[in-house]
Amino acid sequence: MKKMMSSALAARRRRKTARPKSKLSRIATYTLLSIALGYGLLISFPQMLFAHEVSYKNFKVFSREPIDDNIYAVLDEAQAKLSTSAFKEEVRPQVFIADSFNTYTLFANVKNKSFGITNPLLPTSNNFINRSDVARNLAFRSSEKDNKRSLSGVIAHEATHLVIRKRFGYVQAFLMPSWKVEGYCEYVAGSQTLDFETGVKRWKENPNDDADYEYFKYLQMVKYLLDTEKASADELFTKDFNTEEIEAAVFKSLP
C-alpha cells in the first residue's frame, strides 16, 4: 500500500512538473503559428504598406514612394515583351516595387538577392520587384556584380510566371523544373542580366558550376528547344526532356 501511494505521489509530481512545460510549449507553438499566419497575410495583401498606386492596362503598380510618370513607358515595354509569348492567357499582375533592399527582403525572404519574385507558395498575382529606378527603366539587386537590368524585363519575367500558372494550373506550374520555367520567363523578358558574350565566357570557364550564369544557361536551353529544335511552347512544358543531353548540345553550340 505504501509503495502504491509513493508511486501515485511521484506520478502526480511529474504531472505538475510537466504542465508548465506543456503550457510554454503551447504558447510557443501558437506564437509561431500567429507569426507565420501574419506573414502570410502580409505578403498576400501587402497593399497596406504601399502608399502610391498606378493602374495601367492590365497592370496595377504599388510603391512606397511617388511613382515616376515613366512607369507608363516601362509597362508598355513589359506588355510588348509579354505579347511575344506563345501563351495568350490574360493576367493582371499586381507589381509591388520596393523602395530599398531591406523592404524587398521582407517580401523575398531568402531570395532577397534576386531582381524580382513571384512567391511560388501563394496563388496570388503579386509580383515583388527589388529596388528600382523607374525613370531610367532599371531594377537593382543587392550584389557586388550583375546587379542591374531593365525594369520592364523584370516585370515581364515575373508576369510570365503568372501566365504559366494560368496556362498549366498552380500545382503543375509549381512542380515544373526550374530550367523550363525560369528559362521561358527569361525568353519572354528579352533582356537578361548577362549579355551573351559574358554568359558564354562564364559557362565555358566553369561548366561544372553555374552559380554565376544559371539563368543564362536556362535561357539558352529553352532557346535551343524553341528556336533550333522547333518545339512548341506547350511541348517545352509538357514533354520530358533529357536535361543533360540538352545542356551538352547547347554547350557544344556555343561560339
Image (cartoon, helix red, strand yellow):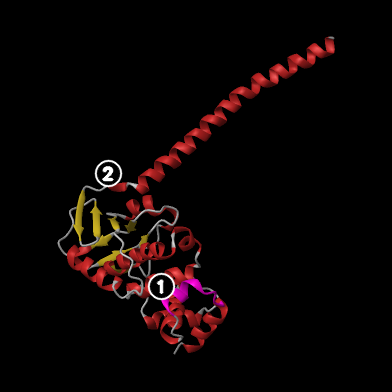
What residue type is disc 1 on? Tyr
Q: Is residue 21 left or right of residue 119?
A: right
Q: Nearer the viewer, mark 1 or mark 2?
A: 1
Task: Residue 69: give x, y in percent of width and height.
Answer: 14, 61
In this rendering, the answer to whether 126 lies above or below 236 is above
Q: Which residue is mark 2?
A: 48
Q: Are marks 1 and 2 in contact (CB under 8 Å)?
A: no
- Residue at the (51%, 62%) spot, across then down: 175
Q: Which residues are magenta?
A: 232-242
Residue 233 painted magenta: yes
Which structural element holds mark 2? helix
Q: CA distance from mark 1 to mark 2?
A: 32 Å
What residue type is disc 2 on? Met
Task: Residue 225: give x, y in percent of width and height.
Answer: 46, 81
Which quadrant of the rendered structure holds the N terminus?
A: top right
Q: Which residue is mark 1?
A: 184
Q: Is residue 2 left or right of residue 197?
A: right
Q: Is residue 66 left or right of residue 26?
A: left
The answer to whether residue 143 is seen in the rendering is: no
Number of residues whose C-alpha sits closer than 10 Å to that of mark 2, classed few (under 14), some (14–19) or many (20 or more) = few
Number of residues whose C-alpha sits closer than 10 Å to that of mark 1, classed few (under 14), some (14–19) or many (20 or more) = many
